[in-house]
Image (cartoon, helix red, strand yellow):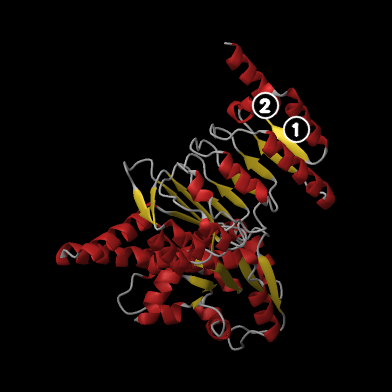
Amino acid sequence: MIQRIQDWLFGYDFFICYRWQDAKFYAEHLGQSLAENYSCFMDTERYAPGDNLIRIGDRALRETGRLVLVGTLGIADSKHCKRELKTFRATGKRIIAIDFSGTIAQLRQGDSELAMLLNNDELLVRENEIDPSNQGPTEETIRKIEHSLSVELKRVRRSRTISAVSYLLTILLLASACLALTTRTYFVNNRANSFLRTALLAKVSVLESGGLHVAIRGQEMKDASVDIASLVESCQVLGDVERLEITDYSLINPESLAELHHLKLLNLRGCSGLASLKFVWELSDLDTLQLHSTGLNDDAFADFQPAETLMELKITSNRDLTNRTLDVILKDPVSYQTLNLDGCSGIAIEEKQVKRLEEIAVALQNKKRSLTIKVFATNVNALLEDRSLIDRLQRLESEGLTFEGLRESTESSKVINQS
């Protein structure tokens, strides 16, 4: 019973398709060999009395990474094998066909339906001088089939695991919510609601690297909040989160983000509740930090010390930030490639900042690196009183620093001041 539940949740690596009359002996020994390291669906083992064979078989096919076809000539006379091939073909995944001295080519030529199902894109494994009715597979055949487990299949297995764990997690969360309503305990109620929101609103996908991309958007919920401690706990069940995007939420316990040690991108657009960015220091793999319109003030940057991996810092539309924050950021620009200040109307580049930028330009030249700073009209308004400061900034553009929007912003500031 436990094995059947596990198979239902996690799916299979291999589904063995064969005709009983021709290859039962071969298929059973193939399944036993593969089952030493992988999960296999064999109709002799996975069906129980009373089971709906077609329904269970079809579901197993949809949740399988590879179909292994034991390609005896009798396949042409088997409606069940053709149905299994057709169902698996619809998933878009690859078939492994075992060829017994040219049987696959004969099947394509002798049956138009099989010719469509076996259309030369399958992985062909040849078995010569083997009688599948009374002989099992060779070690070389087992090795080739196991070797066919590519990175793509590993991602499929990871996705199945995430889906299964998410399903179980949702059941547990619903149970927790029911428990909270029953006991009327404040703590349980609070925690269950937080977990429940995370389970229902988070969108989780698997990246090429195998890490997770988690996105939670709260536009549809007025005054939505998310407990980051609960979110981190949920994510750690699923795997390593590399990209996390939370939009328009009030954050509770944001310091818990420090526990996502594999995080590479953090986007908290429109979120509130960030009293401190001290947790950023713990994110040693972080290369992109986007904090658009998060209501940040200078106190949040008091302990800001990013890791040397940080390449992009976006703090746009945070009007309460001042030069105090800019001085913290420019104190040690580590490996920045882009710094976006657009819409930070409280930040004004002045003589002190220009001097620091000149020092940074020298360091960039020595390290053969570049830095792009995106500015807004209000950021350079103070420079209009001293044209030499603007000239100094523009000269830095040939020394590794680029000021995106500088010319447009100075022209805009002139028009505003004249009017």
Q: Is residue 197 above or below residue 141?
A: above
- Residue 187's mark? none
Res. 151 in view = yes
Whole-angstrom CA distance, mark 1 to mark 2, is: 10 Å
Q: Out of 185 and 132, give the one closest to the viewer.
A: 185
Q: Residue at x 79, y 35 (%)?
A: 397
Q: Out of 40 and 52, give the one closest to the viewer.
A: 40
- The answer to the question of whether label 1 and label 2 lie on touching residues, with beta carbons closer than 8 A, is yes
| Left or right, residue 83 beside residue 396 | left
Q: Quadrant of residue 409?
A: top right
Q: Position of residue 68 (x, y in %)?
A: 58, 72
Q: Position of residue 403 (x, y in %)?
A: 71, 34
- Residue 383's mark? 2
Q: Which residue is mark 1?
A: 393
Q: Is residue 211 above or below residue 405?
A: below
Amino acid type at circle 2 is Leu
Q: Residue at x 62, y 20 (%)?
A: 413
Q: Out of 240 and 48, give the one closest to the viewer.
A: 240
Q: Residue at x 51, y 35 (%)?
A: 317
Mark 2 or mark 1, which is nearer the start of the sequence? 2
Q: Nearer the viewer, mark 1 or mark 2?
A: 2
Amino acid type at circle 1 is Leu
- Under circle 1, the secondary element is helix
